[in-house]
Image (cartoon, grey):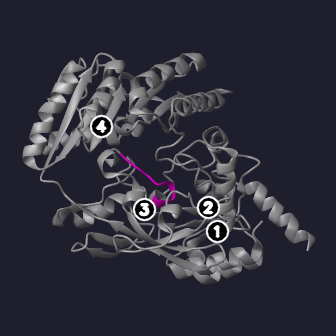
Amino acid sequence: MIPADARNRIAKLVGESLLLDRPEDLKLYEYDGGVDKSRPEMVVFPRSAGDVVEILAVARDHNIPIVGRGAGTGLSGGAIPIAGGLIISFVRMKQIEEIDLNNERAVVEPGVVNQDITLAVQGKQYFYAPDPSSQRACTIGGNVAENAGGPHTLAYGVTTNHVLGLEAVLPDGSVIQTGGKEQDLPGYDLTGLLTGSEGTMALVTKVIIRLMRQPELVKTILAVYESTDDCGKTVAEITARAITPVAIEMLDGVMLRMVEEATHAGYPMDAAAVLLIELEGLTEAVEEQVEQIRDVCMSCHAREVRVARSAEERDLLWKGRKNAFGAVGRVSPFYYVQDGVVPRTKIAATLRFIGEVSAKYGLLISNIFHAGDGNMHPIILFDARKPGDLKKAQDAGDDILNYCIDVGGSITGEHGVGMEKKELMGHLFSNETLDMIGRFKSLFDPDCRLNPGKVLPTGRGCMEIRQAALTARNTL
């Protein structure tokens, strides 16, 4: 329970209107985009880095666990307050503080919505490259915490490739700056360390990001297949021919039918799979690559290859891709999204394995993923109202992620580990590596108050570290 003194200090700092502690309000913050739940004891909305410093000072004085939260669109339980305590929501810190087009930089607060950055600069022919499917809602602070990706990161990279510097507050209330607008700074790459650390080391209060100039020409291609094997093989063949599109997305038949029924984007309802491929660059180079891609797709037995004839047609195809999760919601009241990574040459085999998992558990699994970098997103449909159905979905997800590791991949490409995948970390990393990750966590957060119970598996994680710290403190 958060002590009355702590509540009073926080209320005095931000005002009663920026503090929530009624059960009916807290219920809205017990979940994110995943399937896990745990309710906080309080939610507070800072307006500045100074507010964050003061809130952390209160939390330090009363040993209150803290979870930073953006828009709550995360899919691995990263914003779930396992230990209760205090959620610090950054949605009020949403200023784009500076746009420096001459140096292709911007400085933003963590509550800025991803897409709003591109909207702010697109009139000047610039954009912000990392584009998660939730980009209309997700915030930069959450993107930094999870090292978010998106369809166009095949060529452009994920969030860490576009974050140049951070302002962050440590659990003791001290403020640090890492990186900067400069291209390269000496010393350890603390910006890279904190990006993707899932809010377990520091709370980010300012982000310096890289802006990119819009390309001269964009072409979007839809390749249609009668076989998921042929579709998967096409991705490896594109890479083998040294062609690098900015995006290669794959939707299997189950998914594309749900998407088409919801969005009418123009996907063929009778196909086994489609590839959505996008090329960008100089006009001559893009036009040449379009023909190369057409040749690759047809040599891999594509039934049809379409090139979007207008910006409107291109936008419609991407609308279908970006609204896929909403389309699933029209078919199933509950679904569980996974986030494994496999080598491109293993995509076809992985799809076959996912089919076997579907049959094993009797659950429908649809597939939509960033095929260009092997980032699989099997979507497991289940009904939480049926006893045991959620457990079956979670077990199916674990089977898929273990397979991803076994074929040389990973348990996450962009969603993060959070609480959902932490027990799989022991399969992915050695004991020595896990110990090192734990030491980094303890260095930044020795009392383990920042997002406890995330990333590291049971027995090595923050909940154990926190309990040890509390025991030691109580014996003094």
Magenta stretch: includes residue 338: no
Most extreme residue toward the left, as rendered? 284
* Dot placed on the residue nearer the N-terminal end, 2 or 4: 2
Q: What residue sits 51% from the left and 37% below the top?
A: 338
Asked if labels 1 and 2 touch by Cβ distance under 8 angstroms, the answer is yes
The residue nearer to you, when weighing 205 against 116, is: 205
Vertical placement of 327 versus 162: above or below?
Answer: above
Q: CA distance from mark 4 to mark 3?
A: 24 Å
Name the disc covering residue 248, or none. 4
Q: CA distance from mark 2 to mark 1?
A: 8 Å
Residue identified by numbered label 2: 200
Q: What residue sits 48% from the left and 66% below the top?
A: 189
Residue identified by numbered label 3: 140
Range of magenta residues: 144-150
* Dot placed on the residue nearer the N-terminal end, 1 or 4: 4
* Dot placed on the residue nearer the N-terminal end, 4 or 3: 3
**SS class, disc 2:** loop
**Picture quadrant of residue 401:** top right
Asked if labels 2 and 3 touch by Cβ distance under 8 angstroms, the answer is no
